[in-house]
Amino acid sequence: MSEPPRESLLASPGQMHGSVRSLLEVGQVERAKQLAMDFIAANPDSSAGHQVLAEVLSHAGHYEEALRTLEEGSLARAPDDDQVHLQRGSLLQELGRYREAEDAMRRAIELDPSWGPNHAVYAQLLSSCDRDLEALQRAEHALSLAPDMAWLHTMRAQLLLYVNPRHWTISEDAVRTALRMNPQSAQSHSVLGLVLLRGGKNAEAEEAFRAALRLEPSDRLAIRGLSELVKGKSLLYRPMLWFGQMLSRLGTDGQLGVLFGLWALYGAARALLPDGNQSAADLLTGTYLGFCAYTWFAEPITRAILKRHYPWLE
Amino acid sequence: MRADFVDPGPVLARVPNARRAPFPLMPAVGNMYLALLVGIVPTMALLLVTGLALRSTKLTLAAVGIGVLGFLAPLLPIGVGVALSDTPNVAFILFVGRVLSVGLGFVAYKVALPSIRGHAHLEGAQLPLLYVLGPAFGLLFLLPGEVVLALVAPILLVLGG
């Protein structure tokens, strides 16, 4: 398809935005930036040019500059545009200014509460700050407003898995919905693999991870999941996989509880041993140290051994 | 709008802004493991350095506060041990001391988590947990018992124990 004439690009924000996105997709950042700046020069009172320029700068990783452009160019001209506030929130999130990002996103929602993507982006922010339950509720609300966001179904599946891992079948439904909408999403295939792994459907999980790697050979989630499955096939690593899955089902607090509880058991057993029973004390210490070594050191050692057979393992 | 959705209001008011430290940091959960291995006071000394590197007043003050609590914590089992018997059980005192250390390590983990996550968000480097726990684990078994005791319960040095 040929590029639209430059005059029409500079007259229509929609066309200019489309062209800029196409340029960014093929790595032509400087040309995209020039086009946005030309648009601003031709339409000095429009906020759209500054918004697109901020997008280009953000794409190049210049978040501070992008935020300045957006605040001075777009926000000053369109203070009641929810999309400007949403974009500002995303930039603040990139800069790690979470509270301000939340304020900006909530302002966007206040300006247009019925626009699903406003809630979806806010859900992403909440998720990145480990507020999984709030993120899940917000994501579900966003989906009730705009059910066609495939990536949000995937995010919901992942959040459901964190919040309520026992109900993994609901996660499976969510991620399969995402895959029906976009079968080419490596992320969705990886999340499906993760969900199936949690459900003990190892063969299907392996297929999902492999599908993800076919679409995106460097997909970290899929590589991690597949390595877990490979370990599970070896007699040597099976107990480790069982232990890892058990800990993963318990969640972070539960994992800490297990380690702490075993330490408490060890300490109590040592304290209760009669004086002079050195061999029993040594046995207890040996068992406990073995457990610690298993927990802390078995993973890198087994990974190193496995890498000799499976070089693709990370 | 979905009828059952209730907006809980802003929830990130207490999340600190992300800052990047100039050197790799230990994962937040390491605070709990280290507290278990070498005691809460050395762990909080490390967290103090982390707090300063991240220019976080809250984290720095928390490290000092938890460190002071951890320094004083062995007084509790010592007091209980002395009250229960004329010859207190050292193993009991050490055990309760370690339990308190791990409890305080858990508090430190919760306090440090948002700041360490912010460091990671800004692509700050993180040390693998193994690099921290491996040497700590080794030290625990290589150092003489007296030194380990001094790390776990440094107040004993002050008390002349």
Image (cartoon, rainbow, N blue to C red):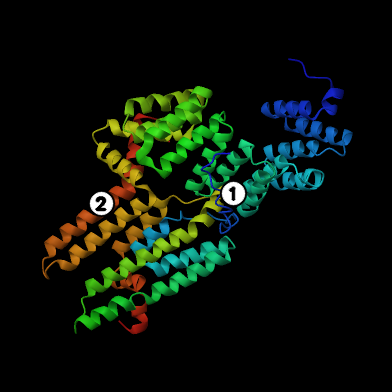
Closer-to-camera residue (A310/A43): A43
- Element carrying mark 1: loop
Label count reads 2
Q: Disc 2 on helix, strand or loop?
A: helix
Q: How packed is label 1: few (under 14 Cα within 10 Å), some, or many (20 or more)? A: some
Q: Position of residue B161 (x, y in %)?
A: 30, 81
Q: Is residue A64 above or below residue A51?
A: below
The N terminus of chain A: image quadrant: top right
Q: Residues within 10 Å of mark 2 (few under 14, many from 20)?
A: some
Q: Chain of mark 2?
A: A
Q: Is residue B94 visible?
A: yes
Tell me which residue sits at (34%, 84%) in the image.
Answer: B159
Read off the residue under disc 2: A291
Question: Is B150 placed left or right of A37 in the picture?
Answer: left
* Nearer to me, B151 or A94: A94
Do the residues at discs 2 and 1 belong to one chain? no
In which image quadrant can residue A312 be found?
top left
Q: Give the residue type at disc 1.
A: Leu
Q: Is residue B118 left or right of residue A111?
A: left
Q: Which image quadrant: the C terminus of chain A?
A: top left
Q: Residue type at mark 2?
A: Phe
- Kindly report the distance in space between the C-alpha atoms of the residues bearing marks 2 and 1: 35 Å
Q: Residue furthest top?
A: A1
Residue denoted by label 1: B122
Q: Is residue A180 left or right of residue A122?
A: left
Give the image location of residue B116, x and y in percent. Answer: 51, 55
Residue sitting at x 54%, y 43%: A138
Chain designation of label 1: B
Of residues B43 and A65, the one drawn nearer to the viewer in this rendering:
A65
The relative height of residue B139 versus residue A41 in the rendered view (above or below) is below
